[in-house]
Amino acid sequence: MAKQEVPISGSLEDYLEAIAEILEKDEHAHTKDIATKLNVSMPSVTNALQALAARDLVVYRSHTPVRLTESGSAKAAVIRRRHEAFRRFFSGLLKIEPEQADAAACRIEHVIGEPITSRMTALIEAVESREDCRGLRDYLASEMPRITVEQNELISLDKLPKNSLAEVVFISENLRGIKKFADMGLVPGAQVQYEGTAPFGDLIRIKLMDTQLSLRAKDARFIWIKAVK
């Protein structure tokens, strides 16, 4: 009987993807390299690697480079394929700037499964290569850059300038502790104010009504807001 794959969170997928990219470039991945690439603290890296090792996705020992297991390499390849598919879609078809396309791919790749990824890849390749899609390619190249967003566009909570006020518009189900935050009033429609970075770790402080909350910067990326003038 085939071994059933254990699902992992979007955050752990980010770690697997980062490790694979570092290994491809440098042939070895140290915890410091991972922390730098993901802009997270060393304790956060240690916790994530322990969780991945418990799932037999990496080989992790203190003071030695991290290695992907066979199953870890396979899963990382799937994650990277999803990321590339969405990056190509946003950049190649929607004509989004490369940096924005890459950031959008990072956020959406964790909630889309393989069947959708495969169909999207087929669509991208058809539009980019088929002769009967030439008119569509010309249309996309001409019209997509003209479509602009409102000044009050959505951003993730970690991008909110200090002391700025914003309204919560959407919270991804990938946010860890989403029910706990909801019980505190962090729900769509709530107004929040970014107060700064907490003294230790990668925590940020926000003000929600009369309450101060602390959450990790990478978790704040799952909370979408719009500025309040």
Image: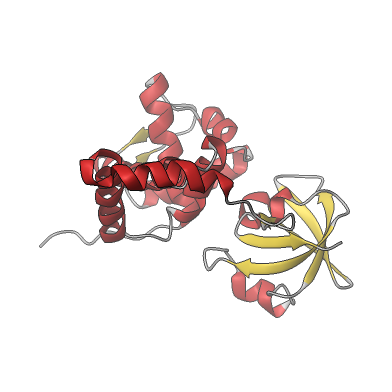
Q: Looking at the image, which is closer to me, 36 or 155? A: 155
Residue 185 in which image quadrant: bottom right
Write down the quadrant of residue 40 in the picture.
top right
Position of the N terminus by quadrant: bottom left
Q: Residue at x 22, y 46 (%)?
A: 132
Residue 213, compared with residue 96, is above or below; it is below
Left or right: residue 167 versus residue 73 is right
Residue furthest to the front? 135
Write the residue at 52% across / 36% down. 98
The residue at the far top in this view is 26
Q: Residue at x 67, y 69 (%)?
A: 169
Q: Residue at x 60, y 59 (%)?
A: 222
Residue 209 placement, left or right of 185: right
Vertical placement of 127 versus 152: above or below? above
Is residue 72 in sight in this rendering? no
Judged from this view, the residue extending furthest toward the bottom is 183
Q: List x then y, in percent, for residue 76.
A: 34, 43
